């Protein structure tokens, strides 16, 4: 599991917008973005008002936050405490309707911390209670809702994952999913970007002691609903993940079968689960369908990987029809941003 993959974009939201507009694409490059391997502009998503945000990685491989207005103007920013070495820096992950952003910064010791940036540009930094202070430990702030509640997870000093919610007054609730493993890189994680809904429910995945994934959403009253897609495998690195939870408690995500092939599913508010595959998705290990995002209209979108391991995009309508599309430069490395990474 590579926690630094929060650098990767939730690019498929942009694909959905492109498809809705006769597949007209706008490419963006933040001034100062590098052109080497692992460098460049990583758009996280686009708001309802048309603001694109994310991070860019410069020629020194340090990450910086950015926002792009509908007029094409850029604002860039850094958390003051962020490190300036390769693989360090500032990485926005989620933004609410008021333009408040939350994300992660990695300091000079390679420890992760959470931050909140207001629309006016003020930045608050924080660490979840119990977060470890060693390299590759710390706090991963991945979601913010309309009310300014923030959700994510943290790795403790033993490298075990735990979920957290941070409230606007600065107080925290930490939580463990049922059956969460107790070893390193096991435990409880959350989806990124859209994992926390307006009601305060948060979605994610649990890794058990056998390294099997189980999806969940934690309801506002603290009770858990565990999600296991019917076709999910039960071996290490297999099982069910989530993309997030909608306002009406719809949960989409990928699951991994006993052969390591990924498939899509949607859990509807009544508890029923529909599984699906994008047309043309490959059927070998590491191939398949990977839902990444959804919107208020019930569209679910993401990449799929064909039998040649080439990456394509898909959009599934609420009625179940699936449209596919390809951007020539779409990279396989941009496929995943969630915990767990398998």
Image (cartoon, helix red, strand yellow):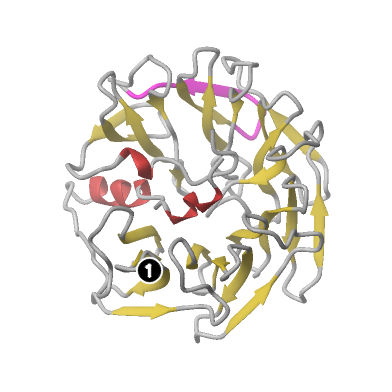
In the displayed structure, does residue 208 sit left or right of residue 42? right
Residue at (69, 33) in percent of width and height: 207
In the displayed structure, does residue 66 sit left or right of residue 33? right
- Quarter of the view holding residue 64: bottom left
Residue 213 image point, x, y percent: 65, 29
Whether residue 55 is situated above or below residue 317 in the rendered picture: below
The span picked out in magenta is 268-278
Whether residue 235 is situated above or below residue 134 in the rendered picture: above
Residue at (72, 63) in percent of width and height: 133
In the displayed structure, does residue 11 sit left or right of residue 153? left
Whether residue 194 is situated above or below residue 318 in the rendered picture: below
User: Which residue is the site of mark 1?
Assistant: 49
- Quarter of the view holding residue 109: bottom right
Q: Which one is in front, 222 or 136?
A: 136
Judged from the image, the secondary structure of the residue bearing numbered disc 1 is loop
Q: Which one is in front, 229 or 138?
A: 138
Q: Which one is in front, 167 or 233?
A: 233
């Amino acid at each position: 599991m590579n926690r630094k993959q929060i650098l990767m974009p939730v690019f498929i939201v942009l694909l959905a917008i492109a498809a809705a507009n006769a597949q007209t694409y706008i490419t963006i490059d933040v001034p100062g973005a590098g052109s080497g391997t692992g460098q460049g502009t990583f758009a996280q998503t686009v708001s309802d008002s048309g603001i694109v945000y994310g991070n860019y990685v410069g020629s020194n491989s340090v990450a910086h936050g950015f926002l792009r207005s509908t007029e094409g103007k850029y604002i860039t920013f850094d958390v003051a405490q962020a490190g300036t070495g390769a693989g360090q820096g500032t990485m926005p992950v989620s933004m609410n309707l008021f333009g408040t952003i939350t994300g992660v910064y990695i300091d000079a010791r390679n420890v992760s911390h959470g931050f909140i940036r207001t629309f006016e540009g003020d930045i608050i930094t924080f660490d979840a209670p119990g977060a470890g202070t060693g390299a590759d430990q710390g706090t991963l702030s991945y979601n913010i809702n309309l009310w300014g509640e923030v959700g994510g997870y943290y790795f403790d000093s033993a490298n075990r994952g735990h979920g957290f919610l941070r409230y606007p007054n600065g107080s925290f609730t930490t939580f463990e999913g049922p059956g969460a493993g107790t070893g390193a890189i096991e435990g409880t994680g959350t989806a990124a970007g859209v994992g926390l809904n307006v009601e305060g429910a948060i979605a994610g995945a649990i890794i058990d002691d056998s390294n099997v994934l189980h999806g969940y959403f934690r309801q506002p009253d603290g009770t858990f609903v565990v999600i296991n897609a019917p076709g999910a495998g039960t071996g290490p690195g297999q099982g069910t993940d989530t993309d997030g939870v909608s306002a009406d408690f719809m949960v989409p995500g990928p699951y991994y079968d006993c052969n390591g092939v990924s498939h899509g599913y949607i859990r509807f508010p009544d508890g029923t689960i529909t599984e699906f595959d994008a047309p043309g998705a490959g059927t070998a290990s590491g191939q398949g369908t990977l839902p990444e995002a959804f919107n208020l209209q019930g569209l679910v979108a993401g990449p799929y990987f064909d039998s040649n391991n080439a990456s394509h995009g898909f959009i599934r309508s609420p009625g179940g029809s699936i449209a596919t599309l390809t951007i020539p430069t779409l990279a396989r490395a941009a496929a995943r941003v969630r915990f767990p990474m398998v």
